[in-house]
C-alpha cells in the first residue's frame, strides 16, 4: 500500500506532476482538464479524486469540492483494497482539502479508517495524530501516540503522549492522576532507553514538579541527564526553583548565588535568592508548567518576611548586602545595575521590618548617582518608590536635583538626569497638585531644555533616537493637564503643537504619535488621528495589543469605512492564526520542542477567547448592517449569514463571557484616557484629580473588564433583536390575528432578549419600560442619564416597540390608559435629537459627546427602527402578482399605517434637524475657524497663559541654527504651526462632512420609504 | 538589569513598545511561531525588573555538515533600554548557543546582513560606533563576507556578515568573497 517508486497515490508520477505544476502556477483551468483526463484513466483512484477536489476548492467551488472529497472518502472506505489504493499522499491531499473546507472531522475519519486497515503503519498513524492535533482531541492524541510508542519505542512518540497528557491536565481540566501515569511511562522509558532530548528532560522535570516531587526532580537533574541542559545557568535556575519549592532554602540560595556569579545582572535570580533568604513561599507563584517558559521571580512586593526571628533576618540581610557588595566589585562594569538595585530591595525589606529608612534612601540616591541619566531609571525604581510618603518623595526629588546640579558629569549625562527628574515629578503625581503657574513653568522648561539640547543630536542619524526626546510628551502631558485645570483650549492646542514639532524634527517617534492620535480624536479631528495611526504600521499581533487606540473612536464616528477596514484586518489576522495554530503546534511536536506544544495550545486558547475578538466579530456584523441598511435584501442576507443573529448571541453566553481574555496593552495610553471607556477630560478636574493623584495611569482593570463583558453581551443581542423584529413585522399581514407557533416563539424570544437587554442596562424589564416611557413623556430628563444610557434606552425602545406593536395583543400599558406604541419611540427620537443638537459649537469629541452620540443614534437605533417599519411596509405591499390576504390581520395593520408613516416622518425630521445643525457647525469658513483657533494661542500681557510655549517653538524654528546640523535646522525651517492648525481644522471639517453624508443618505432612504406607503 | 530567558508566545502580547519602532518589523504569527517551534534556543528575550520587554533576538539554524551555521534574523531593543549594549549581549548569547548548545556540528554564526546591521546601526544605541570599545571591535567581530546585490526589495544591497566560532579554528568560513553575489546565488532564504 505504501507509495512505490515513481508512483503517486498509485498513479505514475509523470501523469500527476503536470497537474501539480498547473495548480502551483494557478492555471486551474488546465489543472482541471488534466484532472478530468486522469480520472478517465483512473476512475477508482481516491488520489485522482482528491486532486480534482483540491482544484475545485482553489477555484472557489466549495460544494463541488466537498462532494468530490466525499466520493473519494467513500472509495477509501469501500473495503475493496484490491482496486483501491490508499497511501499517505492520498490521505494527506484529502486532508488538505477537508481542512480548507472546515471539515476536519471527515479528514480524521479517513485516517482512522486507514489506520484500521493498515495496522502499525507509522506514517498513517502520524497523520492521524496530526488530525487529532488539529481537532485538539488530547485524549485521542495520547492514545495514538502510545500506540506508535509501543510499535517503535521511540522517545519522541512517548513525549507526544506525555504532551497530550499535559494538555489534558492543563487545558481540559483532566484529572491530575494522569500526571502519575505520565511519570510512570517516563520512568519506565528512562530505565530502558534513557533520555536524549533536552526538551524531554524539561517535560520530565515538569511532570514531577507538578506533583510536588521536587526531590525526585532534583535527582533527575543532578544525574547525567543534567548535561542535556545546554546553558549551565539555566540548569542552576531550575535547580534553584526546585530547592526553593521544596523549602530547602539554604540550598536554593546557594544555587542562586552561583547564577548571580555567572549572570550578575539577572534580576529574577536575585529576587529568588532574596526570597530564599527570607524563606518565602515559592509555591504560591504560577503553576509549575509556566515555569518552563517564564522566569517569573517570586513576588517580594506581596511577601512579608515576618516568620524569621529578628536576629536571623538581620544576619541574612547583611549577608545579602555583603554578597551584592562583592558582586559590585567583581563585576566592575558600569552597565551592570542589578547589584545596585538589589541593594535598594534589601534595604526596603529592612525598612519593612522596622529599620529606619535612611539606608534605603541612601541606596536610591546611589542608584541615581550611577544610573540616573538612563532612560530606564524611573521604570527600574518605580516599584520601590510607591511605598514612600509624599514628603519622602519630595525630599528625594530635592536631593536628586542637588546631585544633578552639583555633578561634574558630561552634558549628555546631565540631560539624562534632568529628564529623569521631570519623569519622577510626573510619576509622583506632583503635576496634579502644584499650582497652575508652576505647572506651566515646568512645561515651558521641558520645551526649552529640549530645544537647547537639540545640538547634542546633530550628528545622529535621522532614524536614531534623539537625546532628550522624552521631554516633549511630558510637556504635552502637562499642557493637557493645564487645559483640564483651566479650561483654556489654547493649552490643548499647544499640547498638539509640541508633539507635532517633535515629529517635524524626527518623524519616527511613535511615543509622540500615540498621544497625538488621542488628542486629535478628542478634538474631533478623527481623520487626522487615523492618518497618524496608519503611520504606526499596526499589523499582525500588534492589532490585538494596540488597535484599541483607534477602534473605539472609529466605531463611534461617521468614519464607517475606516472602522470596517481596521476590524476586517484584525479579524483576518485572528481567523488566519486560529486556523494555522494547530499546524504550528504539530511543527513543534515534529521538532521535539514539547514545551512549545503546550505553550502554543494555551496561547491559541488565550487569543481565541480575546474580548476584542468577540467584540470585533459582533461590531463588524453590526457595522455591515449599518452600512447596508438601505438595501433590505442585503440586510436579510447579512442576518442569514449570522444564522439570523443567533451566532453572535452564542459569543456572549455566560461561560464565554467569564473566560474572555484581555490582551490589550494599555500602558501606552495617555494618562487621561487609561482605557477606552474612560476620558477624564470629559469630567471636571476637581472630581477626578483626587482619585488620579498618585494613581496616574493605574486604571481600574476590574472595572474595565466588567464594562467590556457588558458591552459584548449587549451588542451581541442587536442582530438577533433586529432579525426577530423585522421578522415579526413582515408576518403581520401574512397571517390572521391568530399567531402561528413560530410567531409565538419569536415573540417570546424577543421578550426574553429584551429582558436580557434591560438587565444589561442594570434595570428590570419593567423599570426599563418605565424609564423610556418617562423620558418620552418628558417626565424624566435626558440630562439625568449618561449618553451611553441614552443610546441603550433608544435601542431598547425600538425593539420593545417592535415586540409590543406586532404582538397583536398590545400588552404594555402605562398609566393604565395609554398603550405604548410608535409614539413612544417618536417622542424618544425627538427628545434625544433635541438634547444632543441643541448645543453650541464644540471642538471636542470626548466619549459620549454630542457628535458621537448623534452618529450612533442615527446609524443604529434610528436605522433599526426604520428597518422594522420597512419590513412592515414590504409585507403590506407585496411584490409581483401575489394578492394581499384579507381578514382581520389586514384590518389591524391598516389601522397602524398612519402610525408608521408618522414614525418615518419623525425620523426624517430628527435627521434633518441634525443635518441642519451640522450645516450650522460647518458654515464658518476655514480661515475664520483658523482665526478662532489661533486666537486661543495669542499671548496675553501676563507671564502665563496659552501661547507662551508656542512662542518658544516659533522662536526656535525661526532663528537660523546652523550649529544643529543640516537635518535638524532644515526641519526647523520647515516648521509652521499655522499649517498644523489648518490641518486640524480641515480634519474636523471632514469629520462633519462625513456625518452630513450619512444624514443625507439616511434621508434619501427614508424619503423613498415614505413614498412606498 | 537584564533577565534573559527564552522567548515565549505571551511575549508577543507585550512587545508592542519594542515593535512600534519603525525599524522593527512585526512579522506574521506563523513566522514567530515557526522560529519558536523549530529553534526555541535561538529566540531570547531580555526582561526588565518591572517585567517590561527590553529587547529580543531571534535566529535560526541553517545548513548541514561544514556549512552548518547559526543565523540572526532580528535583534531589537526598546528605546528606553538603548545605548546599554543590550544588543551586544543578546548577540553574544546566540553565539554561545551556536558554540556550546550545538557543539557537535561546525559552528559558524552568520549575522544576517544589511537589515540587522541597519537595525543595529541606527537606533538602539547599539549603533556600534556608539558602543564603548567600538573602536577596537567595530562590528562585534563580524566581518563582511560578501555583498548581496539588490537584496532588499530588489533595491538596497545586503551585507552577509559572518563571525567564525570556536570550531572553525582556521576561520576558513569567513574569508571574504571578492565579488558580490545576487540573491538567487544565496544558498539559503
Image: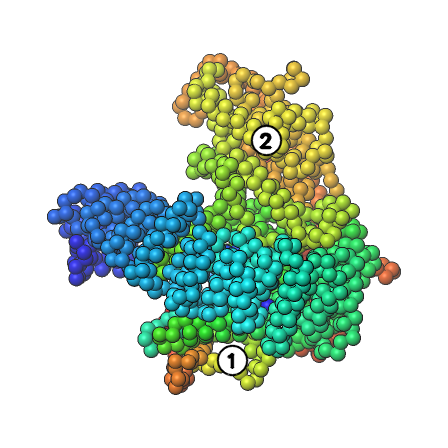
- Pointer 2 local density, CA inside 10 Å: few below 14, some 14–19, many at least 20: some
Foreground residue, A338 or A693? A338
Q: How is the image coloured?
A: rainbow
| Residue B32: quadrant of the picture | bottom left
In the rendered structure, find residue A536 and report the number of the disc placed on it.
none
Query: What residue sits 71% from the left and 66% below the top?
Result: A364
Q: Is residue A680 left or right of residue B59?
A: right
Query: What residue sits 40% from the left and 22% below the top?
Result: A882
Foreground residue, A549 or B35? B35
Foreground residue, A192 or A268? A192
Q: Quick one: SS at disc 2?
A: helix
Q: Quick one: SS at disc 1?
A: loop
Say which residue label 1 marks.
B139
Let me know if marks 2 and 1 both belong to one chain. no
Q: Is residue A526 left or right of residue B42?
A: right
Res B171 seen here:
yes
Determine whether label 2 and label 1 are within 8 Å by CB. Answer: no
Task: Give how far apart the Cα atoms at labels 2 and 1 are.
Answer: 65 Å
Percent across and percent down for residue A847 are 66, 44
Q: Is residue A689 left or right of residue B113?
A: right
Query: What residue sits 63% from the left and 49% below the top?
Result: A675
Residue A418 to residue A586: above or below: below
List the single residue furthest toward the right: A941
| Residue A435: quadrant of the picture | bottom right
Percent across and percent down for residue A141 are 33, 49
Read off the chain for label 2. Answer: A
Res A979 seen here:
no
Say which residue label 2 marks.
A759
Residue A774 to residue A466: above or below: above
Read off the chain for label 1. Answer: B
Amino acid at each position: 500500500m505504501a507509495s512505490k517508486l515513481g508512483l503517486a497515490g498509485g498513479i505514475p508520477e509523470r501523469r500527476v506532476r503536470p497537474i501539480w505544476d498547473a495548480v502551483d502556477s494557478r492555471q486551474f483551468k488546465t489543472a482541471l482538464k488534466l484532472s478530468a483526463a486522469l480520472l478517465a484513466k483512473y476512475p477508482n483512484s481516491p488520489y485522482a479524486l482528491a486532486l480534482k477536489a483540491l482544484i475545485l476548492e482553489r477555484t472557489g467551488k466549495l460544494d463541488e469540492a466537498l462532494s468530490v472529497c466525499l466520493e473519494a472518502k467513500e472509495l477509501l472506505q469501500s473495503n475493496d483494497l484490491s482496486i483501491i489504493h490508499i497511501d499517505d499522499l492520498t490521505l494527506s491531499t484529502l486532508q488538505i482539502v477537508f481542512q480548507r473546507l472546515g471539515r476536519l472531522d471527515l479528514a480524521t475519519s479517513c485516517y482512522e479508517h486507514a489506520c484500521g486497515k493498515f495496522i502499525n503503519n507509522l506514517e498513517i498513524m502520524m497523520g492521524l495524530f496530526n488530525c487529532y492535533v488539529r481537532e485538539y482531541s488530547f485524549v485521542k492524541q495520547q492514545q495514538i501516540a502510545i500506540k506508535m510508542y509501543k510499535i517503535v519505542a521511540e522517545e519522541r512518540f512517548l513525549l507526544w503522549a506525555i504532551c497530550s497528557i499535559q494538555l489534558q491536565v492543563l487545558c481540559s481540566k483532566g484529572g491530575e492522576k494522569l500526571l502519575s501515569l505520565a511519570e510512570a511511562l517516563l520512568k519506565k522509558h528512562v530505565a530502558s532507553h534513557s533520555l536524549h532530548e533536552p526538551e524531554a528532560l524539561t517535560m520530565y522535570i515538569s511532570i514531577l514538579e507538578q506533583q510536588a516531587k521536587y526531590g525526585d526532580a532534583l535527582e533527575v537533574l543532578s544525574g547525567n541527564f543534567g548535561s542535556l541542559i545546554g546553558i549551565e545557568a539555566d540548569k542552576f535556575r531550575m535547580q534553584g526553583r526546585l530547592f526553593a519549592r521544596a523549602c530547602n532554602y539554604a540550598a536554593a540560595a546557594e544555587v542562586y548565588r552561583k547564577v548571580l556569579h555567572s549572570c550578575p545582572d539577572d534580576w529574577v535570580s536575585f529576587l529568588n535568592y532574596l526570597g530564599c533568604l527570607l524563606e518565602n513561599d515559592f509555591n504560591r507563584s504560577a503553576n509549575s508548567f509556566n515555569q518552563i517558559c517564564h522566569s517569573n521571580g517570586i513576588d517580594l512586593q506581596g511577601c512579608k518576611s515576618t516568620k524569621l526571628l529578628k536576629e536571623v533576618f538581620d544576619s541574612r540581610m547583611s549577608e545579602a548586602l555583603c554578597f551584592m557588595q562583592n558582586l559590585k566589585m567583581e563585576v566592575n562594569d558600569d552597565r551592570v545595575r542589578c547589584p545596585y538595585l538589589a541593594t535598594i530591595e534589601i534595604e526596603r525589606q529592612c525598612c519593612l521590618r522596622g529599620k529606619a529608612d535612611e539606608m534605603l534612601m541612601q541606596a536610591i540616591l546611589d542608584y541615581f548617582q550611577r544610573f540616573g541619566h538612563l532612560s530606564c531609571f524611573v521604570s527600574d525604581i518605580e516599584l520601590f518608590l510607591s511605598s514612600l510618603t509624599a514628603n519622602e518623595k519630595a525630599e528625594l526629588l530635592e536631593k536628586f536635583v542637588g546631585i544633578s546640579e552639583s555633578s561634574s558629569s558630561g552634558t549628555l549625562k546631565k540631560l539624562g538626569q534632568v529628564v529623569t527628574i521631570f519623569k519622577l515629578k510626573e510619576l509622583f503625581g506632583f503635576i496634579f497638585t502644584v499650582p497652575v503657574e508652576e505647572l506651566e513653568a515646568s512645561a515651558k522648561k521641558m520645551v526649552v531644555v529640549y530645544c537647547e539640547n537639540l545640538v547634542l543630536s546633530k550628528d545622529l542619524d535621522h532614524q536614531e533616537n534623539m537625546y532628550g526626546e522624552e521631554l516633549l510628551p511630558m510637556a504635552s502631558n502637562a499642557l493637557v493637564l493645564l487645559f483640564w485645570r483651566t479650561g483654556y483650549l489654547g493649552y490643548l492646542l499647544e499640547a498638539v503643537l509640541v508633539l507635532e514639532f517633535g515629529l517635524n524634527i524626527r518623524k519616527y517617534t511613535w511615543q509622540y504619535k500615540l498621544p497625538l492620535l488621542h488628542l486629535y480624536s478628542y478634538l474631533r479631528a478623527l481623520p487626522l488621528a487615523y492618518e497618524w495611526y496608519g503611520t504606526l504600521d499596526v499589523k499582525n499581533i500588534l492589532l490585538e495589543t494596540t488597535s484599541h487606540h483607534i477602534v473605539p473612536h472609529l466605531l463611534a464616528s461617521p468614519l464607517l469605512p475606516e472602522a470596517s477596514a481596521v476590524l476586517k484586518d484584525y479579524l483576518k489576522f485572528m481567523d488566519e492564526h486560529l486556523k494555522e495554530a494547530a499546524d504550528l503546534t504539530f511543527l513543534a511536536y515534529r521538532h521535539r520542542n514539547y514545551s512549545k506544544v503546550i505553550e502554543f495550545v494555551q496561547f491559541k486558547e488565550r487569543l481565541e477567547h480575546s474580548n476584542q475578538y468577540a467584540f470585533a466579530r459582533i461590531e463588524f456584523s453590526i457595522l455591515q448592517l449599518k452600512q447596508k441598511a438601505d438595501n433590505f435584501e442585503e440586510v436579510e442576507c447579512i442576518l442569514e449569514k449570522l444564522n439570523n443573529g443567533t451566532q453572535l448571541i452564542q459569543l456572549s453566553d455566560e461561560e464565554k463571557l467569564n473566560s474572555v481574555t484581555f490582551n490589550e496593552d494599555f500602558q501606552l495610553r495617555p494618562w487621561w484616557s487609561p482605557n477606552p471607556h474612560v476620558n477624564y477630560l470629559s469630567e471636571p478636574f476637581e472630581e477626578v484629580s483626587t482619585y488620579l493623584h498618585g494613581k496616574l495611569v493605574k486604571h481600574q482593570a476590574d472595572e474595565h473588564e466588567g464594562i467590556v463583558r457588558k458591552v459584548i453581551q449587549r451588542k451581541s443581542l442587536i442582530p438577533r433583536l433586529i432579525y426577530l423584529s423585522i421578522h415579526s413585522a413582515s408576518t403581520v399581514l401574512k397571517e390572521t390575528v391568530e399567531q402561528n407557533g413560530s410567531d409565538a416563539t419569536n415573540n417570546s424570544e424577543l421578550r426574553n432578549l429584551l429582558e436580557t437587554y434591560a438587565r444589561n442596562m442594570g434595570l428590570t424589564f419593567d423599570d426599563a419600560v418605565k424609564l423610556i416611557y418617562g423620558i418620552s413623556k418628558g417626565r424624566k430628563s435626558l440630562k439625568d442619564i449618561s449618553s451611553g444610557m441614552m443610546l441603550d434606552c433608544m435601542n431598547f425602545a425600538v425593539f420593545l416597540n417592535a415586540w409590543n406593536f406586532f404582538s397583536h395583543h398590545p400588552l404594555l400599558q402605562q398609566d393604565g390608559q395609554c398603550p405604548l406604541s410608535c409614539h413612544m419611540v417618536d417622542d424618544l427620537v425627538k427628545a434625544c435629537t433635541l438634547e444632543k443638537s441643541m448645543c453650541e459649537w464644540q471642538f471636542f469629541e470626548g466619549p459620549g459627546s454630542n457628535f458621537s452620540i448623534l452618529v450612533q443614534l442615527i446609524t443604529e437605533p434610528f436605522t433599526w427602527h426604520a428597518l422594522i417599519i420597512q419590513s412592515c411596509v414590504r409585507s403590506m405591499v407585496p411584490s409581483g402578482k401575489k394578492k394581499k390576504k384579507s381578514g382581520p390581520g389586514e384590518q389591524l395593520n391598516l389601522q397602524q399605517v398612519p402610525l408608521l408613516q408618522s414614525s418615518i416622518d419623525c425620523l426624517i425630521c430628527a435627521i434633518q434637524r441634525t443635518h441642519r445643525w451640522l450645516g450650522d457647525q460647518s458654515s464658518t469658513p476655514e480661515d475664520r475657524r483658523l482665526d478662532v483657533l489661533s486666537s486661543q494661542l495669542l499671548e496675553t500681557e501676563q507671564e502665563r497663559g496659552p501661547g507662551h510655549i508656542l512662542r518658544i517653538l516659533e522662536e526656535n524654528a525661526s532663528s537660523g541654527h546652523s550649529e544643529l546640523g543640516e537635518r535638524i535646522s532644515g526641519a526647523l525651517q520647515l516648521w509652521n504651526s499655522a499649517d498644523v492648525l489648518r490641518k486640524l481644522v480641515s480634519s474636523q471639517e471632514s469629520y462633519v462632512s462625513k456625518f452630513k453624508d450619512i444624514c443625507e443618505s439616511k434621508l434619501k432612504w427614508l424619503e423613498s420609504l415614505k413614498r412606498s406607503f | 538589569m537584564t533577565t534573559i530567558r527564552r522567548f515565549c508566545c505571551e511575549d508577543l502580547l507585550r512587545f508592542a513598545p519594542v515593535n512600534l519602532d519603525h525599524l522593527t518589523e512585526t512579522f506574521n504569527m506563523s513566522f514567530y511561531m515557526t522560529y519558536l517551534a523549530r529553534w526555541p534556543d535561538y529566540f531570547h528575550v531580555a526582561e526588565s525588573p518591572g517585567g517590561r520587554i527590553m529587547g529580543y533576538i531571534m535566529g535560526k539554524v541553517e545548513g548541514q555538515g561544514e556549512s552548518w551555521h547559526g543565523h540572526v534574523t532580528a535583534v531589537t531593543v526598546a528605546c528606553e533600554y538603548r545605548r546599554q549594549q543590550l544588543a551586544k549581549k543578546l548577540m553574544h548569547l546566540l553565539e554561545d548557543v551556536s558554540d556550546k548548545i550545538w557543539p557537535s556540528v561546525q559552528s559558524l554564526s552568520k549575522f544576517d546582513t544589511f537589515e540587522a546591521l541597519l537595525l543595529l546601526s541606527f537606533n538602539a544605541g547599539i549603533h556600534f560606533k556608539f558602543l564603548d570599545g567600538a573602536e577596537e571591535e567595530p562590528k562585534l567581530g563580524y566581518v563582511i563576507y560578501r555583498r548581496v546585490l539588490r537584496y532588499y526589495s530588489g533595491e538596497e544591497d545586503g551585507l552577509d556578515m559572518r563571525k567564525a566560532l570556536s570550531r572553525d579554528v582556521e576561520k576558513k568560513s569567513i574569508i571574504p568573497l571578492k565579488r558580490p553575489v545576487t540573491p538567487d546565488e544565496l544558498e539559503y532564504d
